[in-house]
Image: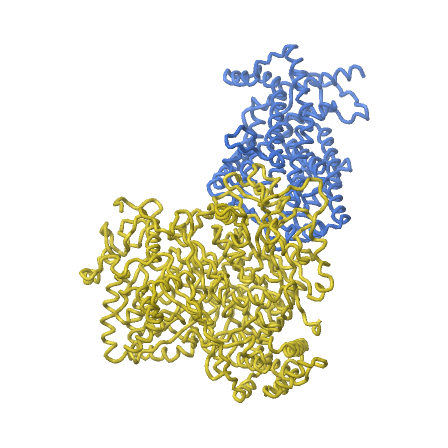
Chain colours: A yellow, B blue
């Protein structure tokens, strides 16, 4: 390497209090002159010694190539940690300039989502879903899609440290090995683990071996927003926890009890796909969705009937529903022989008593709409027995889950639309109760070594757990994380973790399917993989994650051709036939009925309830430092860079607050100040707050964004709590950066919605005036070859934001920050418009509509550009030539869809070299003063053109997907060639539901929309 | 000079255009005197703040160029705001000059003579201020030359379908012709200044500027023809410039912009505001420069009449816009005119616009109002405020809430927006004060000619 100074854009590693560090140094410790380093010096292995003994695996080789690029970007005068391989002999699969795709997986709540990651010469830039993975089905959520940005986060922890001193990895391992000898003597009585729930077979194998070595050690799982209640519910129902799995492709009637199953809960991506496939009136019967929830969720937005109840009332509603179902199943539907027969059947097998709901009928007596909905839903469920699903949300206590399971069993969907498998992860108890014992031990000083892999427990644990204080009593706490967050300062050791995209691992999906997680790049910083950390407790960390992983899997699969099999596993991203078979556990009616009866109605009264919400963007705070996600508009509130105290219009009036006023929320003596935001569709008397904000760790992006709602979280009220005090702080204001200000459609034909009955009767009634040619003086232009077009099925779109992040990642769309969003200068090429229908006090429904460049054939933007910077291609693309743009913004003014985005400032200017690595090299990074907008992923069209031209055939559907289309869990977005009658988009654009937005302007958009179909219950009309 | 009794003017002709008896020498002296006088404290008191404003403009422009368009309040959907508002406003102000100089010359309206120089200078400076905005409002002003049809090796030229390219031609033509017209008119007076220069240095400077004018018959002959030709050339410009500026809006698809009434309505508005600005400037100028005898109350009254007439046309424009929005049944336009503008976030500006542009000029129906100096001065300022509000309403509210409610957003200007606006006002005043200091504010030769003509008429009558 050059011995000259760092190039201009090189970043410097931090210097630790040494005025004149040595110019060349082997580790941060040597630079800092730390004594620990000198001890370890003679044991230091040469770099690369931990590589697998059998030589380079193909992946690893590429990873190292990645390191070359990474460290070239990170140029400083230190030697690279790994061997750098020059590019003199190119690996066979690699053609410079052509990206490669690798399968991997990430875990959330201990369950895997399979991904495909695009890598350019070892530099991952884009995450996509793995079609072969049962949870992904080819789609990915915004958090998955933002993994690359998290990977290239320059504020990630880089140094392993003990107290304030940077320490070499070796020193850490040696010190730990010494400590472990002590622990071995007493069987690990003072050794504890606080772990992130995991389904990784290798990690679990290592944990088992640790338990063998230290029989008295204990593992406690913790997740701030885990799925404990889900497993608690199945444990109550079946005596043993199971993973409930819902097959929404078979579900005709769905009742959600506060479950956001289409997005946030469990296998959201699969649920969304299966659900959406049943919302297409041209493809079979529609399902019907009833949602009972407190805060408006994505699932609630898709509901045919929705009821907003306080979170504490959901249980009462479950009880009511159970009673109504019992009633409905006992009185067979007249004239329906089948139903009658099965009704008799059910009476025999389900002891659900019709009187069950009697207790709560009185409670809801003053709200006839609740009783009416429960009755109608129950009748509907009992008409569709095998195809009925009642699903409870993770915020609801296990009893509500139990009630849901009881109804499912009573209806007979148990084993059909609702099945159960053995949980993929053993870490099922993730709540504060599981941690209580550990806390007591810590306070008592009985824990010497505590290894924490749980994500930021000091921030995530309920405020009354006082974990930080307990950690001070643990002399040897080891914290393994990506960032020096709120937990790090309380732990003696900090071990920087490797990012999921830079570490080897394995994980299981909810159905048990196993994936091997491949790294896309060698660790950018000196990170330690989770497998290596656990292996350190067996003195095997030096073997490296890759070696350990292969050892485990070699033992599991004693095939003759392990290497071949391994390669296949890696290539596909899933191990074939590893899904668990569904089991049909017996429902314990006796205990269940007694328990369900305990579902007492909430205390009536005017008191406020606090309801916590897992943010769809930053999660429980683990994604707070990802700017893409911070700037992602919330699907419901369209809020960015903040969380807010969400209140319904009526509650806002009662509290005398408006959006942007500051509320002081107090619960059991703790207070938090939060800006209020008025959101329609929310239950009255409820204040909704999102977790994951108000971070105080070292992450620069996350710091100071929003308020920490977790401060009001108590161990016995992790999801909702009554007795909330809320008062307006006089004169205090906090403007909220929302991306959509006006929430009503004002009667304009923009996002259209029809009921199924209307549609069946006259399919084209709403749409016929909104499509087709209009009189014009101009001769229409012919597009003989390709004619690119898009169809967006609003009936399928849930508004989950996956497309927005996918577009941002694919097209190098910059993040602008809160101030600029407040000025309405966000850059998203694709936005999701969300409209409420009915009055804003209590809207009848919510519609989402992805809005992107419509690629009008008669584009208003084109003729007004004075310099020909936006022109039409011969395939009908409205193209933007950044080089030519002078930035008059006339095109933006004249765009009736307002989808053009202007670089008001140099948004891409202050990028860390590390962040630059995440840019897609196929797409220009735009400079200040230039207009930009959706290109229909023209770079992907051109790649497909190259591939197909080599093969001498035209581009077909299978060759090409736009980034938004690819990410969409519900396949609501379809792109392709309108001239190809076989293409899906051409067929969709012929559907009777098709219409053009602002058709009367005769812009002839290439993006067509399909109306949203609602399937309301005629009994509730 | 003998103080002979004024010849009783016939009633139909109105008040006299030149007060008192003057000879060429006395007119020369009184009209050129302000150039030779040392700048008084009054001039400095006006000039220094104006210079400060120019400095503020320089600061704002520098900041804008360093940081980017984002230092303004413009956003999505309001892509144009103060930049284009001020552009249209200044261009509008620049209209009176050409109208007075050219059209009134062709119509042989004698009363134009003493105010034309003034109005032309105002035009020129206003157009300069106006031109600043479109030049600087682009995201990358250093590439503005791409709007010109120069032979480019890139093989790309401007898009002649774009009204912005028409703007470039319209404004640059207007600026050129206005300058020529103003300068040609100045030549005899510059020569008069040369001839009466007290110092050698001044004589040389004015000598160069007067381009060798000797006042020969041949000179006068050529001069008259050139002046008439330029007048003919600039006459269509009066209509064309603001018509083309209005095309920026009228050719778009945005409700509130897409209207066929825009060209005449914009031209009338421009003349309206231009005359208001002339009145605003003429009243103090004639007082401080001692020009009451040539810029008489009759001049001011005539200008007020023009304001009344054009104000009525503007009012008709407003009426038609609203009528068509209602009668056309277009829901987007109805929303814009009856909800967004009248009740929306900027309804205050809307009602202020209607008050200033519709209510205020109605008072000019009364002769008392037309001849009351204080009142007309306030009214002229209010009219310019109203016309600024009109451009704000047209540009900002139309963009703010167009077709899809999802993209509607708020707009608020930043300090740089205000700074540039105040800055251009300062720049305009600086140029105008320099003009008053160094050049004859009234067309001396024309006044002398008029004076002779009037005398001749008087002797005949």
The answer to whether one can see residue A37 in this image is yes
- Residue at 64% over, 39% down: B248
Relative image position of residue B406 (x, y in whole percent): 61, 55
Q: In the displayed structure, would residue A988 be above or below residue A434?
A: above
Depth check, front residue: A478 or B454: A478
Depth check, front residue: B417 or A455: A455
- Residue at 70% over, 48% down: A773
Relative image position of residue B371 (x, y in whole percent): 73, 34
Q: Which quarter shows the C terminus of chain A?
A: bottom right
Relative image position of residue B57 (x, y in whole percent): 52, 38
Relative image position of residue B318 (x, y in whole percent): 73, 43
Asked which quadrant contains residue B14, the reply is: top right
Q: In the displayed structure, would residue B435 be above or below residue A647?
A: above
Q: In the displayed structure, would residue A272 be above or below residue B230?
A: below
Q: In the displayed structure, would residue A149 be above or below residue B433?
A: below
Depth check, front residue: A509 or A488: A509
| Left or right of residue A570, residue B36 in this image | right
Depth check, front residue: A626 or A250: A250
The answer to whether one can see residue A668 in this image is no
């Amino acid at each position: 390497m050059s011995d000259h100074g760092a190039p201009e854009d090189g970043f410097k590693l931090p210097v630790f209090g040494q005025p004149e560090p040595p110019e060349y140094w082997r580790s941060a410790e040597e630079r800092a002159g730390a004594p620990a380093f000198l001890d370890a010096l003679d044991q230091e292995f040469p770099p690369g010694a931990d590589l697998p003994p059998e030589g380079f695996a193909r992946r690893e080789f590429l990873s190292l190539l990645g390191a070359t690029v990474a460290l070239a970007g990170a140029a400083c005068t230190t030697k690279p940690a790994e061997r750098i391989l020059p590019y003199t002999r190119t690996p066979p699969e690699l053609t410079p300039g052509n990206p490669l795709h690798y399968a991997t997986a990430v875990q959330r709540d201990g369950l895997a989502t399979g991904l495909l990651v695009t890598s350019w010469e070892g530099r991952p830039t884009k995450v996509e879903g793995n079609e072969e993975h049962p949870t992904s089905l080819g789609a990915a959520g915004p958090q998955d899609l933002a993994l690359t940005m998290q990977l290239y986060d320059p504020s990630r922890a880089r140094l392993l440290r003990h107290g304030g001193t940077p320490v070499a990895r070796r020193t850490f391992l040696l010190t730990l090995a010494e400590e472990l000898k002590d622990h071995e003597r007493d069987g690990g009585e003072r050794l504890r683990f606080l772990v992130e729930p995991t389904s990784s077979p290798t990690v679990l194998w290592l944990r088992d071996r640790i338990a063998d070595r230290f029989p008295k050690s204990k593992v406690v799982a913790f997740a701030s927003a885990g799925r404990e209640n889900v497993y608690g519910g199945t444990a109550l129902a079946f005596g043993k926890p199971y993973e409930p799995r819902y097959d929404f492709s078979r579900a005709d009637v769905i009742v959600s009890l506060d479950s956001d199953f289409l997005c946030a809960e469990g296998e959201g991506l699969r649920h969304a796909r299966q659900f959406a496939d049943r919302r297409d009136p041209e493809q079979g019967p529609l399902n019907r969705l009833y949602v009972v929830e407190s805060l408006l969720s994505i699932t609630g937005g898709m509901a045919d009937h929705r009821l907003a109840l306080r979170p504490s009332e959901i249980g009462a509603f479950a009880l009511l529903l159970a009673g109504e179902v019992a009633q409905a199943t006992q009185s067979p539907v007249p004239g329906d022989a089948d139903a009658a027969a099965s009704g008799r059947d059910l009476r025999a097998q389900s002891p659900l008593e019709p009187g069950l709901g009697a207790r709560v009928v009185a409670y809801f007596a003053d709200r006839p709409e609740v009783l009416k909905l429960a009755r109608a839903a129950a009748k509907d469920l009992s008409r569709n027995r095998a195809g009925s699903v009642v699903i409870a949300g993770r915020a609801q206590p296990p009893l509500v889950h139990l009630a849901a399971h009881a109804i499912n069993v009573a209806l007979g969907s148990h084993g059909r639309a609702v099945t159960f498998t053995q949980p993929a992860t053993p870490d099922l108890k993730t709540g504060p109760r599981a941690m209580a014992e550990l806390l007591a031990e810590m306070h008592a000083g009985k824990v010497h070594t505590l290894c924490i892999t749980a994500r930021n427990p000091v921030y995530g644990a309920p405020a009354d757990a006082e974990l930080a204080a307990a950690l001070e009593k643990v002399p040897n706490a080891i914290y393994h994380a990506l960032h020096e967050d709120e937990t790090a300062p309380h732990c003696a050791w900090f071990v920087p973790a490797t990012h999921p995209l830079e570490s080897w691992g394995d994980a299981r999906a909810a159905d048990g399917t196993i994936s091997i997680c491949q790294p896309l790049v060698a660790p950018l910083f000196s990170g330690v993989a989770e497998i290596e950390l656990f292996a350190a407790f067996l003195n095997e960390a030096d073997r490296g994650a890759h070696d350990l992983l292969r050892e485990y899997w070699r033992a599991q699969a004693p095939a003759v051709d392990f290497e071949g099999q391994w390669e296949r596993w890696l290539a596909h991203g899933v191990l074939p036939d590893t899904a668990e078979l569904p089991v049909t556990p017996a429902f314990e009616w006796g205990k269940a009925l007694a328990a369900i009866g305990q579902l007492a109605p909430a205390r009536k009264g005017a008191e406020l309830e606090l309801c916590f919400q897992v943010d769809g963007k930053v999660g429980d705070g683990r994604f707070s430092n990802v700017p893409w996600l911070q700037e992602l508009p919330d699907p419901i509130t369209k809020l960015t860079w903040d969380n807010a105290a969400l209140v319904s219009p009526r509650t806002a009036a009662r509290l005398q607050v408006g959006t942007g006023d500051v509320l002081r929320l107090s619960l059991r003596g703790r207070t938090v100040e939060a800006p209020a935001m008025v959101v329609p569709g929310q239950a009255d008397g409820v204040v909704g707050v999102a977790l994951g904000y108000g971070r105080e760790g070292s992450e620069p992006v996350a710091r100071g964004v929003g308020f920490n709602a977790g401060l009001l979280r108590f161990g016995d009220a992790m999801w909702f709590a009554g007795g909330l005090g809320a008062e307006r702080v006089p004169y205090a204001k906090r403007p909220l950066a929302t991306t959509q200000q006006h929430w009503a459609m004002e009667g304009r034909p923009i996002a259209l919605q029809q009921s199924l009955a209307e549609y069946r009767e006259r399919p084209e009634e709403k749409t016929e005036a909104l499509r087709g040619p209009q009189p014009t003086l101009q001769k229409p232009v012919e597009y003989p070859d390709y004619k690119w077009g898009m169809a967006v099925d609003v009936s399928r779109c849930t508004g989950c934001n996956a497309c927005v992040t996918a577009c941002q990642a694919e097209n190098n769309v910059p993040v602008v920050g809160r101030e600029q969003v407040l000025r309405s200068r966000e850059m998203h090429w694709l936005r999701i418009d969300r409209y409420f229908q009915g009055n804003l006090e209590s809207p009848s429904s919510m519609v989402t509509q992805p809005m992107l460049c419509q690629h009008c054939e008669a584009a208003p933007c084109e003729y007004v550009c004075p310099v020909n910077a936006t022109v039409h291609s011969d395939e009908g693309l409205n193209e933007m030539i950044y080089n030519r743009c002078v930035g008059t913004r006339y095109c933006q003014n004249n765009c009736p869809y307002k989808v053009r985005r202007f670089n008001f400032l140099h948004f891409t200017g202050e990028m860390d070299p590390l962040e630059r690595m995440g840019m897609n090299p196929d797409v220009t990074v735009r400079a200040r003063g230039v207009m930009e907008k959706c290109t229909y992923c023209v770079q992907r069209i051109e790649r497909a053109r190259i591939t197909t031209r080599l093969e001498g055939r035209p581009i077909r559907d299978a060759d090409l997907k736009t980034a938004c289309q690819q990410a969409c869990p519900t396949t609501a977005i379809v792109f392709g060639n309108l001239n190809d009658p076989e293409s899906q988009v051409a067929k969709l654009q012929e559907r009777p539901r098709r219409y053009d937005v602002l058709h009367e302007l005769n812009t002839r958009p290439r993006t067509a929309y399909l109306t949203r179909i609602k399937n309301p219950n005629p009994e509730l009309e | 000079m003998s103080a002979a009794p004024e010849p009783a003017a016939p009633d139909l002709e109105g008040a006299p255009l030149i007060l008192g008896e003057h000879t060429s020498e006395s007119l020369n002296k009184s009209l050129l005197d302000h150039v030779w006088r040392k700048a008084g404290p009054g001039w400095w008191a006006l000039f220094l703040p104006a210079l400060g404003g120019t400095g503020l403009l320089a600061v704002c422009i520098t900041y804008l160029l360093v940081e980017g368009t984002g230092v303004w309040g413009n956003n999505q959907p309001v892509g144009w705001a103060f930049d284009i508002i001020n552009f249209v406003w200044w261009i509008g102000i620049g209209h009176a000059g050409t109208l007075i100089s050219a059209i009134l010359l062709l119509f042989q309206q004698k009363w134009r003579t003493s105010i034309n120089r003034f109005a032309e200078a105002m035009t020129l400076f206003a157009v300069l201020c106006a031109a600043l905005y479109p030049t600087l409002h682009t995201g990358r002003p250093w590439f503005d030359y791409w709007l010109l049809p120069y032979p480019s090796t890139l093989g790309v030229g401007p898009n002649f379908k774009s009204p912005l390219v028409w703007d470039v031609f319209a404004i640059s033509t207007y600026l050129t012709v206005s300058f020529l017209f103003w300068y040609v008119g100045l030549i005899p007076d510059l020569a008069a200044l040369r001839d009466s220069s007290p110092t050698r240095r001044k004589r040389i400077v004015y000598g160069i500027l007067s381009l060798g004018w000797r006042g020969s018959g041949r000179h006068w002959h050529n001069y008259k023809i050139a002046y008439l030709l330029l007048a003919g050339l600039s006459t269509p410009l009066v209509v064309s410039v603001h018509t083309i500026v209005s095309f920026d809006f009228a050719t778009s698809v945005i409700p509130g912009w897409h209207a066929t009434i825009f060209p005449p309505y914009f031209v009338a508005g421009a003349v309206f505001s231009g005359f208001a600005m002339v009145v605003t400037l003429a009243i103090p100028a004639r007082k401080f420069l001692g020009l009451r005898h040539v810029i008489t109350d009759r001049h001011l009254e005539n200008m007020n009449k023009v304001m009344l007439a054009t104000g009525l046309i503007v009012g008709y424009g407003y009426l038609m816009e609203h009528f068509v929005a209602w009668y056309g049944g277009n829901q987007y336009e109805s929303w814009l005119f009856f909800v967004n503008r009248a009740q929306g976030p900027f309804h205050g500006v809307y009602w202020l616009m209607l008050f200033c542009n519709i209510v205020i000029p109605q008072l000019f129906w009364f002769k008392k109002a037309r001849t009351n100096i204080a009142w007309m001065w306030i009214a002229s300022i209010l009219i310019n405020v109203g016309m600024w509000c009109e451009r704000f309403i047209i540009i900002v509210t139309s963009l703010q809430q167009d077709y899809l409610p999802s993209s509607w957003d708020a707009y608020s200007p930043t300090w740089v927006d205000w700074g540039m606006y105040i800055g251009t006002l300062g720049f305009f005043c600086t140029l105008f004060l320099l003009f008053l200091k160094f050049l004859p504010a009234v067309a001396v030769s024309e006044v002398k000619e008029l004076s002779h003509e009037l005398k001749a008429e008087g002797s005949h009558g």
